[in-house]
Image (spheres, helix red, strand yellow):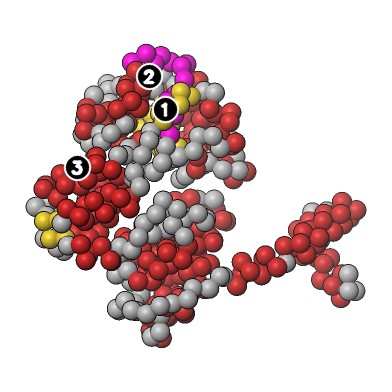
Amino acid sequence: MIIMPWTEKYAPEKISEVVGQKKAVEKFLNWLRIWKPGKKAALLFGPTGVGKTCVVEALTKERDLEIIELNASDYRTASQIKEVIGQSMKQMSLFKKSKLFLIDEIDGLAGRVDRGGTTEIIKIIKESRHPIVLTANNPYNMKLRSLRSYCLLIKFGKVYYWDIIKRLDFICQKEDLKCDKEVLRQLAKRSAGDLRSAINDLESLAREKTEIKLDDLESLGMREKETSIFDALKMIFKTKTALAAKLSIQSVDKNFDEIFLWIEQNIINEYEKPEEIAKAYNMLSRADLFRQRIKIRQNWKFQKYMIDLMTGGVALSKKEMYRKFSRYEYPDKIKFLGRTKFKRKEDKEKLIKLSKNLHCSVKKVREEFLPYFKVLEW
């Protein structure tokens, strides 16, 4: 039996079922009504979990449109984007349906690794015979500057507190789940306008239960929109569910490589039993394999496996939660990089100077010449 996540199970089937976002929905529908080939794409932007993607998917269900969806975090290069939607944008549907293209998380494009991804999307917007919709958390990123002029920006705000409570209560009724009203209020409060996170929290609490009480909230820990790394570590090491561990890093203001180092540093500070420590580091080593594959192959599909292993994998490595206070330490590697920042900058400048004089790459100087310079006390 396939268990469908509640965020999918209770996703809106019609535009009218979208929670909140009345002004944004009206602006989006008006854009679609007057859209013609060659016109601007719609760029839906706002915080995570407020319904940007849900609005598009609900519209395609309600109007029986064929949706071609692409996540910009997974398909980042021009060739990948063109392969997925480049040809489809010029073709009619096999089932004679109207099409709509959705490019999700457009701000997932970043830097040199994307090799013309933004340029390809602009080309698609200009040439497409079908409407193009983009979503982003922050459309004002400098890397999206050239793209913005080809889009109509539509802002999605945080979902109101009472609207979240109402939706959670609706889900509880559908699931025949008894839930303390104060639990719903606390879930709505801690979500800070993120409906998806509130539903995920409710589902996490409801696993294998028919009733949720206020005491059950302790298993989730506290969620803030910008969770500190220490709160995230506490959740990973103390929780008993993989989902809660995974969700704990969603709002941490650090990249996944940094979070990986924090977890690596502090496993030994939390876990005490040798078999649990070994299992946790084994999960982390598997996560590291996917982390390296991302760097080498630039295949961002591996990121979800890395996240699952380094959060849920580590969290489930323990048999029971340790009811103790643990002092989490700053990663040694980050401290080392901080101490040697200026020294490494000086060394890099010297390597660049040498590479110019020797007419070879910096990599070659570092690998073939530097060992001899060190012997000469350079």
Residue at 28 percent across and 43 percent down: it is 161
Residue at 28 percent across and 49 percent down: it is 188
Please state the horizontal and vertical placement of residue 329, each as a whole percent of the image. Answer: 53, 73
- Return the residue at label 1: 154
- Sequence-wise, the earlier of marks 3 and 1 is 1
CA distance separating discs 3 and 1: 25 Å
- Sequence-wise, the earlier of marks 1 and 2 is 2
Quadrant (top left, top right, bottom left, bottom right) of the C terminus: bottom right
As drawn, is 90 to the left or to the right of 216? right
- Return the residue at label 2: 31
Task: State which region is magenta.
Answer: 31-45
Q: Are marks 1 and 2 in contact (CB under 8 Å)?
A: yes
- Sequence-wise, the earlier of marks 3 and 2 is 2
Give amino acid for label 2. Answer: Trp
Quick one: SS at disc 2? helix
As drawn, is 224 to the left or to the right of 358? left
- Return the residue at label 3: 166
Q: Is residue 289 magenta?
A: no
Residue at 56 percent across and 70 percent down: it is 330
Quick one: SS at disc 3? helix
Please state the horizontal and vertical placement of residue 238, each as a whole percent of the image. Answer: 35, 71
Q: Is residue 41 magenta?
A: yes
Front-most of 226 and 340? 226
